[in-house]
Image: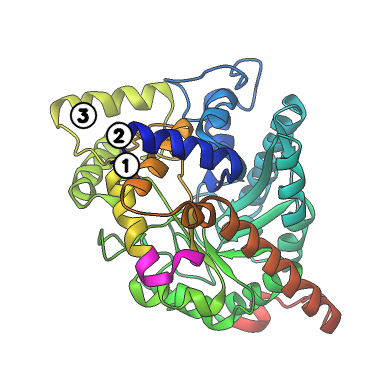
Amino acid sequence: MESPTDHLSQARELLASHPVVDGHNDLPWALRQHVRYDLNRMDIAGDRTGELHTDIPRLRKGGVGAQFWSVYVRSDMAGDDAVSATLEQIDGVRQLLERYPADLAAALCADDIEKVRGEGRIASLMGAEGGHSINNSLATLRALYALGVRYMTLTHNDNIAWADSATDEVGVGGLSAFGHEVVREMNRIGMLVDLSHVAPSTMRDALGTSVAPVVFSHSSARAICDHVRNIPDDVLERLPANGGVAMATFVPKFILPAAVDWTRAADENMEAHGLHPLDTTPGAMKVHAAFEAANPRPVATVATVADHLDHMREVAGVDHIGIGGDFDGTAFTPAGLEDVAGYPNLMAELLGRGWSASDLAKLTWQNAVRTLRAAEDVARGLQAERGPSNATIEQLDG
């Protein structure tokens, strides 16, 4: 009988051949918050444990072969301010790539991901987190693509004019007419439609419109943890026909039912101290630590994440699941997945549950790369049929 130690050794071997393509990491926003992108003050070439979830040594230790860096900006930013902040985030990623060329390299397509991996570097892609980043402009959407952004999450935590968020009240009831046009234009240019954060109505509308595979860059299973940020089974069931991939996240409040109410209270405590709930700067973390000392936190584990992946595999199929940890975008992480070095622990847990090496290769690498390549194929076909859309929200939504 194989021991957990054997499984961990096997996991590391597997990740050497089929490393993780992680769908979502908020290091750029963390660097913005901590040091305004000053890599002299926060050099990720060394171990930044205690400050960040992510640095190059731990990415290497964790078996990460490709990373979608989130160029997220808060959803209370609006208009041109949101666009400018997104451009600053993109520039922050470019600074990372320029600073660490031996370890990180830009990837703009599936072939680039494979090429960079073959060079022994970590393929770096970008994802915009929230449609507020385009300020209702399809031209701005295309500009973000030209700058290297390869997915856009349709909303973040708040509704936008053309799409409903999971964590807001009903607005347009899913996607508006302009929202459907955004999805069509994303298909045409080859930008993945990311359905994390959006309301189930928005998920269903987008799946009805998209002719390219969609992604959930960091979402888990609602049947396992009934949180609005997770994916309902009827949506997971539609992924095989669409060809997309649902990338399980590690955020405790989305995966552990006992953590949902605790985190809500912790967020309220942050707001009472004049802090944003997503703030992870040292001062904010002190406030969190004091709250946790007085109110012990329910702790998610590697097994908690594996429970979601087991369910997602059962419903969507092993060809339609992946990993999107959301490191550096959350104050708390599961035991065993404290940072980006933890992926081998998750693979070992899944091996212990009977997942095969070929299953895990799909989970870590193959599904994400295939999904991006399929979106590129769709885009080439659509570009042969039609040019850019110049529709406006005023024209379509009135």
The Cα–Cα distance between marks 1 and 3, rounded to whole angstroms, is 24 Å
Which residue lies at the image location 73% right of the left edge and 60% below the top edge?
A: 140
Q: Earlier in the sequence, mark 3 or mark 2?
A: 3
Q: Is residue 177 above or below residue 12?
A: below
- Quarter of the image for residue 119 reads top right
Q: On residue 302, which mark appears?
A: 1
Residue 70, horizontal then vertical, whole percent: 58, 46
Residue 343, horizontal then vertical, whole percent: 45, 39
* Residue range (magenta): 313-320
Between circles 1 and 3, the one closer to the viewer is: 1
Mark 1 residue element: helix
Task: Tell me the residue that label 2 is attached to.
Answer: 335
Nearer the observer, 49 or 343: 343
Which residue lies at the image location 55% right of the left edge and 77% below the top edge?
A: 242
Q: Is residue 211 above or below residue 344?
A: below
Is 316 magenta? The answer is: yes
Quadrant for the N terminus, please. top left
Nearer the observer, 313 or 11: 11
